[in-house]
Amino acid sequence: MKNNLALLTAALLVIGACGGSGSDGTGTAGSGSSAGAGGNAGNGAGGSNGGTTGAAGASGSGGVGGSAAGRGGDNSGAGGSAGAAGGAAGGGSTGRGGGGGTDPGGRGGVGSGAGRGGSGGTAGGGAGSGGASANGGRGGAAGAGGAGRGGSGAGGALTNPRIMPLGDSTTASVCYRAQLWQMLTQSGRTQFQFIGSRNGDPGCGVSGYDRDNEGHGGYIVTDILKAAGTGARPGGADSSDPFVSDARDLATWFDGRPADIVLMHFGTNDVWNNFTPTNILSAYTAILNKLRAVNPNVRVLVAQIIPLQPSGCNDCPTRAQSLNAQIPTWAAANSTAASPITVVDQYTGFNPATGQDTSDGVHPNAAGSVKIAAKWFNALTPLF
């Protein structure tokens, strides 16, 4: 029986070997983004087994990387988006972050999300890494200053400032104004003007200078603390000057004349007449309040007054020193960011002796006028 079974098996194997031979299927290679499809199995021509499965097609080549980033947004626009998504199959290359804005003030581009992985393919593309952050755009250039007067904010440089020389005969009757105008123009500062209700030249020999000023010969500054109608003009007052020696003078001098800078040298006659520093500084405050009412941003350069030694006033030098010692404290207490007060030391280096820097122990001569002008010049030049 065993022998019969062996013979039967061998016969069947010979019969199978004579059956149709199935051809192997051929896999089509994947192109582009899709993976190759597997080959179809061979059809046996009566055979018991088909051909072997075709090999899988090669995976598609990696897609093209993301395109370059968009440029940064103009002005305040957003930065460019990240590069295009990665190609199919192979992972797309990482998109770059947008570049900084090209216009002043443009914000830098912000890298967007990662590139998408390629679809299909046996080795689908991995996710692209996030776009790199773009550099920030350049800060916008500073805006040009507007035409006209005034700087931007306190401490800014002024354009075409209106400068008011203010005081008594030290302002009205001496040549520092002419010398100062000459110093400013020769330094290239020609865009300014002196202002005031008075216009005069005491014979300084400087042609073409702006003679407007607010100097009042003989004026006692504490008179402006008097109520309207109670003032009395001093004996040495300039007869051509219509001041009334009371509070009404403030309106006459300042209304309609908004000064950007005031050069105040006031109080010589008060010192001479032995008025106290407290009263003199109260008058300064009244002047300051009126100036600020007309122009809230006025800048006041207040002088520590020049020394004086008139005949018959032995105490005048120490009285001037007493007033000058208190001026910095007054200035600090009243200075503001919008309307700063700067102390200018006109006292130091000035010799009041007749024939030195004055003609009579009080009024500056040509040499004294140059000294006063130089100190005002040094205080003014940082302002415009």
Image (cartoon, rainbow, N blue to C red):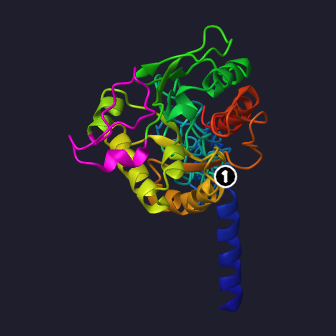
The part of the chain drawn in magenta is 220-247
| Residue 64 percent location from the top left of the image | 65, 39
In the image, is residue 224 part of the stretch drawn in magenta?
Answer: yes
Residue extending farthest to the bottom is 1
Quarter of the figure that contains the C terminus: top right
Could you tell whether 345 is left or right of 236 in the image? right
Residue 71 visible in rendering: no
Q: Residue at x 67, y 18 (%)?
A: 185
Residue identifier under label 1? 21
Could you tell whether 236 is left or right of 22 in the image? left
Q: Quadrant of the rendered structure where residue 106 is? A: top right
- Nearest the viewer among 166 and 114 is 166
Q: What is the three-letter code of the residue carrying label 1?
A: Ser
- Nearest the viewer among 255 and 104 is 255
Q: Residue at x 67, y 45 (%)?
A: 346
Q: Residue at x 39, y 24 (%)?
A: 241
| Residue 57 percent location from the top left of the image | 66, 48
**Number of on-image labels:** 1
Looking at the magenta stretch, what is its main secondary structure? loop
| Residue 321 percent location from the top left of the image | 63, 58
Disc 1 crowd, CA 10 A, few/some/many (<14, 14-19, 20+):
some
| Residue 22 percent location from the top left of the image | 64, 51
In the image, is residue 110 part of the stretch drawn in magenta?
Answer: no
